[in-house]
Image: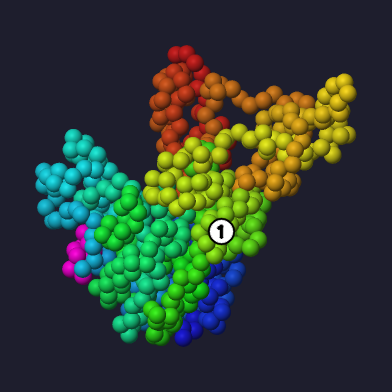
Amino acid sequence: MIESLLIANRGEIARRIIRTARALGIRTIAVHSDVDADMPFVREADEAVCIGTAAAADSYLRQDRLLEAARATGAEAIHPGYGFLSENAGFAEAVVAAGLVWVGAPPAAIRAMGLKDAAKARMIAAGVPVTPGYLGEDQAPERLQAEADAIGYPVLIKAVAGGGGKGMRQVDAPAAFAEALASCKREAAASFGDDRVLIEKYILSPRHIEVQVFGDTFGNVVHLFERDCSLQRRHQKVIEEAPAPGMDDATRAAVCDAAVRAARAVDYVGAGTIEFIADGSAGLRADRIWFMEMNTRLQVEHPVTEAITGQDLVEWQLRVASGEPLPKTQDELAIRGWAMEARLYAENPVTGFLPSTGTLDRLRFPAGVRVDSGVEEGGAVTPFYDPMIAKLIVHGATRAQAARRLATAAAGVQVWPVKTNAAFLARAAAHPDFVAGQVDTGFIARHADALIPPAEPSPAVVGAAAAAIVPAAGADPWSALHGFRVNAAPVLHVAVEVGGTPYVAEPARLARAEAADGVLFANGEAWAFGPRRADHVGAAGEGDGALLAPMPGRVIAVPVVEGQVVTRGERLLVLEAMKMEQALVAPFDGVVAELKAVEGAQVSEGVVLARIVAGEG
């Protein structure tokens, strides 16, 4: 068994690896950027080495510094986690060349599966079904258009070297193809340095089915069944589950066997995932499920597979990397119950899921569920890395039970003042179509109105806030308003502010609501509240011309100057946080009367960045 392990990652996955390594008696070494020095994973490791500044390019992506840290600490092996360098064949080779053990896929397998067109060609040769499409070398626009016409619309244009939803365009008609192709190629070149594309038939009711595979150095390959990751937003997974709803035994056998063939075709070793796209319009059928790509690493959603199989996949990784055979044979693996995982992000669904950063003054998770988190109460969510706060993982005897537990868990999350998607997750898990298993990749877009919580508190929340301040209101005759009616008991009304807005409400109990330090937590939402202030003047009007920062971040562009005449919709400045850009535009025709934004400056959410006044100066 490996005796010492450097973890070339951070946050939640670093803590996850440390937990298993400690149970196996393996000494762990954490690496971290300067802003991560106080993170839990750094404290929990046996040793820690600072490898650079906040930007990932200056720390977690510095292969030279990672190898230097491994040499300096006497590490025997390196585990890349997921993301960062986990699928970088060059880094894997450098680790092996340095005499270290690479706890990951063989470099040759990473390369074989790294380019979508080459991977699909290899899968065809291995007898694995692939989505109908064009994978040819001829990249002339005329040829690509002709192939798309032959496949039949809608089609999907995908960057050969793409990932994460970049370099991807849906085309619904021939007339739109040329423009979509040019746009896709530009994005692919900018993101990956490779503008080559492939064409696929677009599946109208797509479901994302993936199979967990594992191989060892003795030629053994097994699968640990499938996961359904169809609940996505902008091609990013939100809720994952195992097994897949509606998967019968025959279809499962066909898909999982195809996954094993795919892994064998590249002599795979370690943990990997074979991803399939399924046409769910008529239920899951073996002849309507096609290979999409392979992830040559551990997946974020691996805990749902652990929950239904009772296996520790990180332990499997470490044992295989140590030269041991797979811990179980295929016949020894079975599905037990149902598991679901929801990704809790620091983002605000009300503002289009813009990221939210800051100190986690309160961070509480419900009891009775597995929580994999990289942060803790009192810590901070910074703008430098992925905004995921935690993964909520539940298990039940049936899918219905798992869905109820996930909805309850998400509703019980308490985070303040950082905004989260907890209420959104709770609504998604409780939605009738989700509970019924009617999910595909368009689920969130289709039900957005029902899933995104309102910007204003519900009457039930206001009533609960009123109830929480009743003791204080009782001592204040101006806040406690008693109605009078002949022959009827007086009704208590309380003047209360919730989210900065004044209300007069009757106190009412709200199930599972909790008030703490002036914040009401209910159903995954969090609202600041208190007695109505005597000097309350309300919120600024919509037409006051003030542009506030919708999220904390860095100002990356200010194309206007004070005194400049602008028109409604004209871009005034651009913010960036967590790799997301947000443009702020003029709310009406006018003049830039005040400009506080400075290019390169970090700003907090809610600060005034500019002010526009009507007129022409």
For residue 357, side relative to residue 249 (left or right): right
Provide the residue span drawn in magenta: 117-126
* Residue 185 or residue 498, whichever sits in front: 498
* Residue 17 or residue 258, whichever sits in front: 258
The spot of residue 84 in percent (x, y) is 40, 62
For residue 428, side relative to residue 146 (left or right): right
- Magenta-colored stretch includes residue 487: no
Q: Residue at x 43, y 58 (%)?
A: 245
Q: Residue at x 82, y 30 (%)?
A: 492
Q: Callout 1: few (<14), some (14-19), or many (20+) C-alpha neighbours within 10 Å?
A: some
* Above or below: residue 532 compared with residue 335: above
Q: Residue at x 88, y 23 (%)?
A: 487
The spot of residue 430 in percent (x, y) is 54, 48
The spot of residue 387 in percent (x, y) is 50, 52
**Quadrant hosting residue 323:** bottom left
Q: Residue at x 52, y 50 (%)?
A: 429
Residue 125 in view in this figure: yes
* Above or below: residue 237 compared with residue 256: above
Residue assigned mark 1: 401
**Local SS, label 1:** helix
**Quadrant hosting residue 606:** top right
* Residue 17 or residue 569, whichever sits in front: 17
The spot of residue 5 in percent (x, y) is 48, 77
Residue 67 in view in this figure: no
Instruction: Report the amino acid beneath label 1.
Output: Gln
Q: Main secondary structure of the magenta part?
A: helix
- Magenta-colored stretch includes residue 120: yes
